[in-house]
Every structure is written in C-alpha cells, then in structure tokens.
Image (cartoon, rainbow, N blue to C red):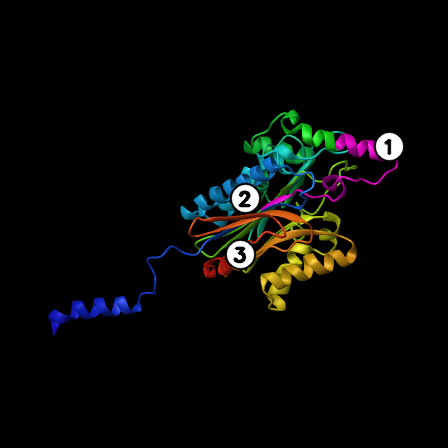
Amino acid sequence: MNALRPLCVALLLFAAAPAFAAEDPATMLVIHGGAGLERNGTSDADEAAMRAAITLALRKGHEQLAAGKPALDAVTAAITVLEDDPLFNAGKGAVFTHDGRNELDASLMDGATRMAGAVAGVHHVKNPILLAREVMQHSPHVMMAGDGAEAFAKARGVELVDPSYFRTERRWQQLQRALKEDAAGQAHAEPEVAKHFGTVGALALDGQGHLAAGTSTGGMTDKRYGRIGDSPIIGAGTYANAQCAVSGTGWGEFYIRVSAAHEICARMAYLKETPARAGAAVINQEIPAMGGDGGAIVLAANGQVAMPFNTEGMARGWIGADGVPHVALYSDESLPLPGEAAAAP
C-alpha cells in the first residue's frame, strides 16, 4: 500500500490541475488611429502606410504581452509607434494651433489599481504617452500641463525635442487652409480641420487579467487659447478599471460633457451591457444626439472587444494571444472581432 501512495498522490494532483494549464493566458491588444478618416483625399499609399503602422503597433504591443509584461507596457509600446508616425495626429504628426505651434496631450490609466497619469499642452516631449506614465508612477499627481509638465519631463529624463521635430508639411498646409477660411469668415471645409479627429489610443489585457488604456493626440487644427480636449482627461477620453478599458477619438468637447469613456464602463458595470451595446449607446447615440461624433475602442476583462464609430472610417485593429494582427480603416470593411474571428472559416 505504501508503494502505491506516490502514484495516488500524483494522480490526485493531475486531476486537480486546471484544464489547458500549458496554454498561454489569454491576452488582447486593441488600437485605434483616429476616427474621421475619409476615402476622399486619402491616397492608396497613405492607406497602405496606415495599415502598416497599425500592424506594427499591434506587433510591438503584443511582444510585451507575449513576454509576460503588464498591460501598461503593451499600451505604451503600441502608442509610441503611432506617436512616431507622421500619418497620425499624435506626436510627430500633430496638427498646428492657430498660432502655428504643436500642443500635445496624452493620458494613461492602469485598470488594476486605477492609477492614472496625464499631460496637456506640451511642446517638446517626443512621446507624450511616456511622460503620462511618468506622471502616474513617479508623482503624486494625475495631470500636469505646459511648462510644468515639461520641467517634470526633464527631471525624469523623458526625451525632449526641438519643436521643429513635430513640423510636417501636410499639417502645416492644413493650418494655412484653415487660416484662409478664418480670414474669409468661412467654416472649415476640410474634414481633418472641421471634425477634430486623428487621436490614437490603445487598450490591453495582460496574462494576469489586468487592463490598461492610453490615448495621445495633437488636438485640433487651428485651436486657440490653450484648448484641451478629452484625450488627457481621465473618464472622458481614457478610462480603465478591473472590468473595462476605453479610449476615445472624436469631438472632444462632447466626450468631456458626457464623460464618454467612464460612461461606457459604467453601463457595462451597472446595466450589465456588453462592450458593443455600451459603446454604441454612448458613441452612436448619446454623443450624436448632442451634436458630436467620433469613435472609441472598448475592451472587457473577458476579452470582448467593441469598436463603435459613426464616421466613414476609423483606423483600428486588434491582436490576440496567437499574434495575428487584424486591421481595418473604413466602416464597410469586414473586421471580425475576437470571438467572431475564431468562428470564421
């Protein structure tokens, strides 16, 4: 009998072990590159470059998750890729203010602890999302703005650049057209000027089941008076808790007024709505009813994903534990979401 005891113990341990323990934990990364994208005026080359950039950002973020890193690492890795790409209105591709400057905003939130960091109106910070993380992890504050934020960046060793780094000819010409329309008393006709779009964002679910959310933007072309939109405001453009993560892109004034990101998570928590239903209620119903528009990405702790938007296009994508990127730009493109992709033939 004693000789059989080790075998019995081994069998009991095997029976008690969780099924599929050898498999990688479920992870997810979701990205947007801004709502408001329109086919008219977007070249084939730009479309291809956007798809490549979203794909690269997904892969960089997935590398972090596959290595067992926390969701925060995946979010910052993905957003940094898009901040460095001049096609997006964040970092290198930021639009110009009325005074011909680039003012950058970003925010980051850890769903597990609900710690958050944000920066607004910075002019020299190469990657604002990295400064937002420094604010979150190395200061007692949630948001810093302007010169104070840049002084903190210098103290923390965050990379600073000359403002000329952010100048791109495309964004400069957008401003020149907007200024001419201002002088003529005309409304802005160009979609990227008139509709306040182009923000980038990312959400991640790591192997520990923790969520994180981040958003980065250059704001809106021709903005004045130090205007700040929803992107750096926790609860408006960015929010994450233990059950839900959201990053928005659109007309910031309306996202602020409805606390859009938090509103989506609240609907999921209190009304038990799915990400798709909660996202649609806020992005496609509540905000348009007030006169705004835009989009968002939503990620639940169970891995469910939603990408509501009410414009012709929103650059977007997701990548699961298998490391296969899924990317789309326009509303008429098929983009199966995680459960749907697994079921597709």
Q: What span is colored magenta in the figure?
A: 175-201
Residue 178 belongs to the span the image colors magenta: yes
Can residue 45 be spotted in the picture? yes
User: Within the image, what quadrant is residue 164 found in?
Assistant: top right
Considering only order in the chain, which callout, 2 or 3, is on the residue closer to the N terminus? 2
* Residue marked by disc 3: 336
The mark found on residue 137 in the picture is 2
Considering only order in the chain, which callout, 2 or 1, is on the residue closer to the N terminus? 2
Considering only order in the chain, which callout, 1 or 3, is on the residue closer to the N terminus? 1
Disc 1 crowd rating (10 Å Cα; few below 14, some 14-19, many 20+) is few
Using the image as rendered, state which of residue 206 and residue 317 is in the foreground: 317
Q: Which residue is drawn at 72% across and 60% down?
A: 285
Residue 84 position, x and y percent, is 57, 34
* Residue marked by disc 1: 183
User: Within the image, what quadrant is residue 121 found in?
Assistant: top right
Q: Outermost residue toward the bottom?
A: 1
The mark found on residue 274 in the picture is none
Badge nearest the viewer, 3 or 1: 3
* Quarter placement of the N terminus: bottom left
Residue 85 position, x and y percent, is 58, 35
Q: Is residue 256 above or below residue 161?
A: below
